[in-house]
Image: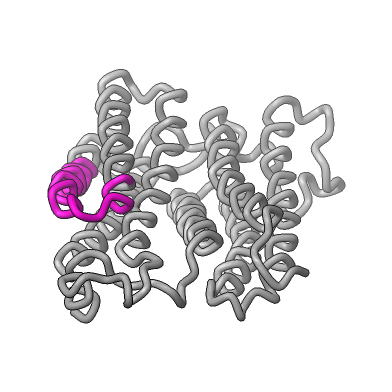
Amino acid sequence: MPTGITSWTRLLAWTNLVLQGVIVGTGGAVRLTGSGLGCPTWPRCTAESFVATPEMGIHGAIEFGNRLLTFVLVGVAVLLFLAVVRTAPTGRRLVVPALLIGLGIPAQGVVGGITVLTQLNPYVVGLHFVVSIGLVALATVLVWRVYFPVADRANVVPASTRAAGWGVAALTLITIVVGIITTGSGPHAGDSGAARNGLDSELLQHVHSWPAYALFALTLVMLGLTRTAPRMRRYVVLLLATEVLQIAVGITQARTGLPAGLVAAHMLLACVATGLATAVVLAARQPVRAAQLSPTDTAASLR
């Protein structure tokens, strides 16, 4: 258990972040292939077995594979916590996000189990995705703090720009939540017998676009607001590019009958957008010592 940040710590932090996205992808594969009840019960895969059996076919293998990945994430989370638990003197504040991730992964497994036990209730399925988005955001915070100490930071943009950054993060979350509700009314239920939420899918597609376009507009505004903050601007540019791609995928999938491949891409891009929106907020405070700040920057840091 090191007392400082090592290359091993950074590797674990990045591995955790990537795996949080990977499990969203495998969870999407479960739903998009109709394998949501490939293992019809939980915590066992069947009433007699913890593992999928050959008789369960491809659906059982896909669902069980997604369950197995949870144990990989738990293992990485444990190693990550051990790697940061003694780093408190470095001022990076890594222990709490690492602990929350370590607790969030098994909690996510329980929500997944409830999903199965409720026969893929669309609202429980939606909660499953919301927890994943929260874990992606936490994993992004942890990666950021591995590189940048919390104790040695100052505001590098005015309060208005910081507020706009939080607005971007809030709109990202709202867009994703409305998208989850929209998905709950659509055709990809995870199983042919699973219920849908009964809402108007076509109307929800339009409602989903409203916060998405508001997010796009505010991100464009952020381009102008971050002219003097190159690191923050870098993440704004990456987020804007992700939003353009996400909008293109969303429009295309809506007009082509929601093909599974595009729906999967839409889910993964939501994870990328979450990470970048989190980075935009984090980049508003950077490791700049007070002695190196200009008077304007110092005044901005106090607002």
On the image, which quarter does residue 201 sit in? top left
Which residue reaches farthest top?
Answer: 256
Q: Nearer the viewer, residue 254 or 122?
A: 254
Determine if residue 115 is in view. Answer: yes
Q: Nearer the viewer, residue 56 or 280?
A: 280
Q: Nearer the viewer, residue 219 or 192?
A: 219
Q: Position of residue 303 (x, y in %)?
A: 18, 79
**Horizontal side, residue 60 vs residue 226: left or right:** right
**Horizontal side, residue 269 vs residue 113: left or right:** left
The vertical placement of 124 against 237, above or below, is below
Q: Position of residue 262 (x, y in %)?
A: 40, 25
Instruction: Name the dominant secondary structure of the magenta segment.
Output: helix
Q: Position of residue 266 (x, y in %)?
A: 39, 34
Which residue reaches farthest right?
Answer: 48
Determine if residue 124 is in view. Answer: no
On the image, which quarter does residue 103 sit in? bottom right
Question: Residue at horizontal 67%, vertical 41%?
Answer: 66
Question: Residue at horizontal 45%, vertical 25%?
Answer: 260
Residue 222 falls inside the magenta stretch: yes
Question: Residue at horizontal 19%, vertical 60%?
Answer: 164
Q: Classify the position of the N terminus by image quarter.
A: bottom right
The vertical placement of 30 against 126, above or below, is above
The vertical placement of 166 against 12, above or below, is below
Start and end of the magenta stretch?
207-234
